[in-house]
Amino acid sequence: MPMQPFENFRGIVLPLDRANVDTDAIIPKQFLKSIQRTGFGPNLFDEWRYLDRGEPGQSCVGRPLNPDFVLNDPKYAGADILLARHNFGCGSSREHAPWALADHGFRVLIAPSFADIFHQNAIKNGLLPVVLDEAVVDRLFELATAGDAPLTIDVDLHNLTLDAAGFGVIEIAIDPFHHHCLIHGLDDIGLTLTHADEIAAYEARRRTETPWLFAAAN
Amino acid sequence: MASPRTLYDKIWDAHVVRIDEHGTSLLYIDRQLVHEVTSPQAFEGLRLAGRTPRRPEANLAVPDHNVPTTDRHLGITDPVSRLQVETLGANCRELGIRIFDMADKRQGIVHVIGPEEGFTLPGITMVCGDSHTSTHGAFGALAFGVGTSEVEHVLATQCLMQKKSKAMLVSVDGELGRGVTAKDIVLAVIGEIGTAGGTGHVIEYAGDAIRALSMEGRMTVCNMAIEAGARAGIIGIDQKTIDYVRGRPMAPQGALFEQAADYWLSLNSDPGAAYDRVVHLDAASIRPQVTWGTSPEMVLPVDGAVPDPDEIPDPVKAGSYRHALAYMGLAPGTAIGEIPLDKVFIGSCTNGRIEDLRAAAEVAKGGKVAPSIKLAMVVPGSGLVKEQAEAEGLDRVFLDAGFEWREPGCSMCLAMNADKLEPGERCASTSNRNFEGRQGQGGRTHLVSPAMAAAAAIHGRFVDVREI
Ligand code: SF4
């Protein structure tokens, strides 16, 4: 699916102070029964966010909220940048996790490290995962949780910088191909198909070298 | 002379179609496994773009996550689950993709049936919209989990855009003690390097203890490479690999097989090949493992005691330990052997193969499930595993001991069907994840080997299988 190009913006930071946040926590398994790609936002972090058990197809309006969960703190209303600890997105390969994060309105994720498959899935859905040093993340947590006003960050993907209020400019590193895809909102299947001749040539060569991979399956 | 290469290097190099100006490779994917949960949006995306699968025959589909493990003839009662399974069937029929549906005796967990059918082959690249695709690395294949967008990408193009990972060697040297299994090896590895220890890497497992494992054991070890954060796990190809694949229905036959086998054996890592990181473990020092927390790295030997967060200097780690202990309902210092259990689950793509059921049955034989255990269930990894187990009389052993003997599927590994823990219930499980809510909201999971799970069912608590 082609995605929207990533635009620069100023966002509010939600500090989720946990390490190893797994994809089961991001979107519990009962919501994976959907055959749609959208509508996962209200069930993002469902087990932490609500006090009752959520079921697919059920409206989340009026469900009892867990007042201790940071996503429900009015201070962070409208947050679109998620700040977390190391190994964010570990666990299953479910793309429902970035779908839920994006559907809820997150656009940037910041952590000292991300699980590999999640990282890949996030980019595919126009989310920007930013890896920062543990010490910088620590400082951002301090700034985000102190005081009554939330921390805001100016995200400039074109120049690869974050400008965090009270901290200053942080340069970010991103794989050049991922950068290209996010900025242009590429349809990467379409891009690959422009190389169909090379794929066919590869297959022709492999047919001779490893014929068993092309023999008719029994 | 060409510089020495790893098995991973060789498979990678053989599958690069092209490299773009950013250094990203277009990697050819030989095989894709498909299941009902991560495929509907991929098929829908394909349809919306007016595309069709490039090589339908390179895919094999099976429903496994949502299927019931009892009264299968009644079908799926949950309408949402049913729709998802039916959608998989409809998509596969429309697009000419081979599927083992629920009534097929070859139906089972996607990572059990791939090897069983000979769809998984050495030296191939294989993906599935499922993180435990790493299982197939046991065959010396480069196998990794992908998201739904990538499932669609592979359907449409038979390729993926990938950056090569780093290489890590995990060498398990020497011999395992009696009663210590592949599951204990991999839990000990995760305990050693942590759940992010393998991030950005492909782990090659080597060493005497890995060579000595059966193919089933090697699959268990590769299966949980993802729990160590790795992109994939991989093990060198030897005669055991070849013998396992020979004669499987979808494997090459006759002269083609011999040609393939020669090629496969030539793929192993060269002596002196470089790894970005090397970890050594002494097999003899590994004891049966039990996880105590909500991440697979929170693991201890069976004779250990739950840690005290107050003694952990790193505040982030201490915080996550506190959180885990609260969720698990455990006090610091509790001995593993004192933890009382409510349920026992034997199954999953980690430990649902025939050898796992044999190991569990050996322990269960002649015993009785403890009265304090509300449910002890055995869920074979596939219909063929079930059939084999029944031919060996293992079902009788389990049933006589008071276990339930179920139909194949993912079952309580992730509790998407009716098999789940109730809030607060504590389970000894042979699966791979002890995350919060994984086996049911509020459920508490302790990961162990099949023998340890069976022993826990009989005794109502964790016991050291080496002592029974
Ligand atoms: S058995 Fe568990 S880990 Fe394996 S594929 Fe099924 S749900 Fe995933």
Image (cartoon, rainbow, N blue to C red):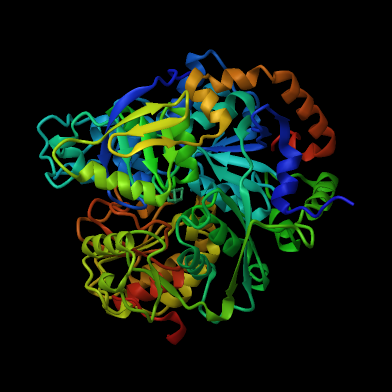
Q: Which residue is at a point 38% across and 51% down the rendered structure image?
A: A135
Residue A69 location, x and y as percent?
18, 45
In the rendering, at what x and y percent does residue B81 appear?
A: 33, 36
Q: Is residue A202 left or right of residue B80?
A: right
B141 above or below B51? below
Residue B262 against residue B77 in the figure, above or below: below
Report the front residue among B76 and A47: A47
Judge left or right: residue A136 versus residue B4.
Answer: left
**Depth check: B357 or B333 in front?**
B333
Rendered location of residue B127, percent (x, y): 58, 40
Which quarter of the image is occupied by the C terminus of chain B?
bottom left
- Asked whether residue B408 appears in the rendered view, the answer is yes
Q: Which residue lies furthest to the right in this view?
A: B1
Q: In which quarter of the image is residue A52?
A: top left
Q: Residue at x 35, y 36 (%)?
A: A168
Task: Please name whichever residue, A160 or A95, is drawn nearer the observer in this view of the structure.
Answer: A160
Task: Count numbered badges in the picture.
Answer: 0
> Is residue B114 shown above or below B303?
above
Residue A215 location, x and y as percent? 76, 35
Q: Nearer the viewer, residue B397 or B3?
A: B3
| Residue at (48% x, 76% y) in the render | B362
